[in-house]
Amino acid sequence: MAMRSWLFVPGDSEKKLSKVAGCGADVVIVDLEDAVSPQSKAVARQMTHDWLRTHQQQLLAGGGHGRWVRINALGTQLWRDDLAAVMPARPDGIMVPKAAGPDQLRLLAAELLQHEQRNGIQPGTTRILPLVSETPAAALGIPAYADAQQPRLAGLTWGAEDLSAAIGASRKRDSQGEWTDAFRMVRANVLLAAHAAGVLAVDTLHADFRDSEGLKRIAANSYADGFNGMMAIHPDQVPIINAAYTPGEEDIARARAIVNAFSANPGAGALQLDGRMIDQPHLEQARKLLENLR
């Protein structure tokens, strides 16, 4: 299953939950955290459970999308209630906000195992995606995920809003629309740590959901930088993200040509293709592109 677009939907909005399945997102993240007020948490948990149950049938039928839940932060008293409500409905994964590091995820993994055993879910199948940048300490610890040995880890992602508030930043992008130094460092560390760990690198969202042209540019650059997917906060962002993270026919044809060239010349370290030198890194990149099409 492709995991290019990760769309948030509030867990307490019946209207939005009823529409989200048809928007084309690869992954739907039902949000129990920031999008839900404290007084609505209990209602949101029940609505999320019911939505997961309904869309589990679609998934079993061979269609649909990934069904994820963003629980409340592990530093609160809310997340265990979140898990108790949603795990009987078998979500595909859990997004962890304000993740403090790999050790904290081990606590979550242990809790997930208990819920899996209790609900007849194959142990270890509920994946984890942490938001790893929302405090200064967490942001500085991103490299620790590179070799953390977390079997449930599906990927790493990041966000700028909480971090900007934590460090008192009055801007996140410069006059040219590029990330300022602190956020650029965080983004680069997420990208490198995810690839080092062999998991997905998921880029942060574009907050201005009306800015489709800006999103096209940002998503295209993100794909070119090596990210595997991107967060979305509005259904209109989904087709733009999906298009940006889908290789074009020209890219696919070149990747196949690279693989074929090396297959025809086993043992070669470097070759010429269409007047350009290609070597082993080009071959590895071509193979990854083609593998992701399956």
Image (spheres, rainbow, N blue to C red):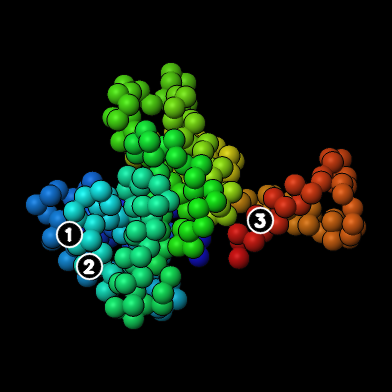
Q: Nearer the viewer, mark 2 or mark 1?
A: 2
Amino acid type at circle 3 is: Lys
User: Which of the two discs, 2 and 3, sits closer to the camera?
Assistant: 2
Query: Badge 3: few (under 14), some or many (20 or more) residues near its Cα, within 10 Å?
Result: few
Where's residue 185, x and y in %?
49, 31
Instruction: Tell me how far mark 2 sits from mark 3, CA to CA.
Output: 38 Å
Q: Which residue corresponds to mark 2? A: 84
The residue located at (81%, 46%) in the rendering is 279
Question: Toward which corner of the image does residue 53 lie, by quadrant?
Answer: bottom left
For disc 2, the neighbor class at 10 Å (few under 14, some 14 to 19, many from 20) is some
Disc 3 or 1, which lies upstream in sequence?
1
Under mark 1, the amino acid is Ala
Quarter of the image where the C terminus is located: bottom right
Find out whether the residues at labels 2 and 3 contact each other: C-beta distance under 8 Å: no
Could you tell whether 55 is left or right of 201 in the image? left
Residue 104 locus on image (x, y percent): 36, 52
Q: CA distance from mark 2 to mark 1?
A: 13 Å
In the rendered structure, the answer to whether residue 151 lies left or right of residue 284 reads left
Residue 103 at x, y percent in the picture: 40, 52
Q: Position of residue 158 (x, y in %)?
A: 41, 42
Question: Disc 1 marks which residue?
Answer: 44
Residue 120, compared with residue 190, is above or below; it is: below
Looking at the rendered structure, the kind of residue marked 2 is: Ala
Local SS, label 1? helix
Which element carries disc 2, helix, strand or loop? helix
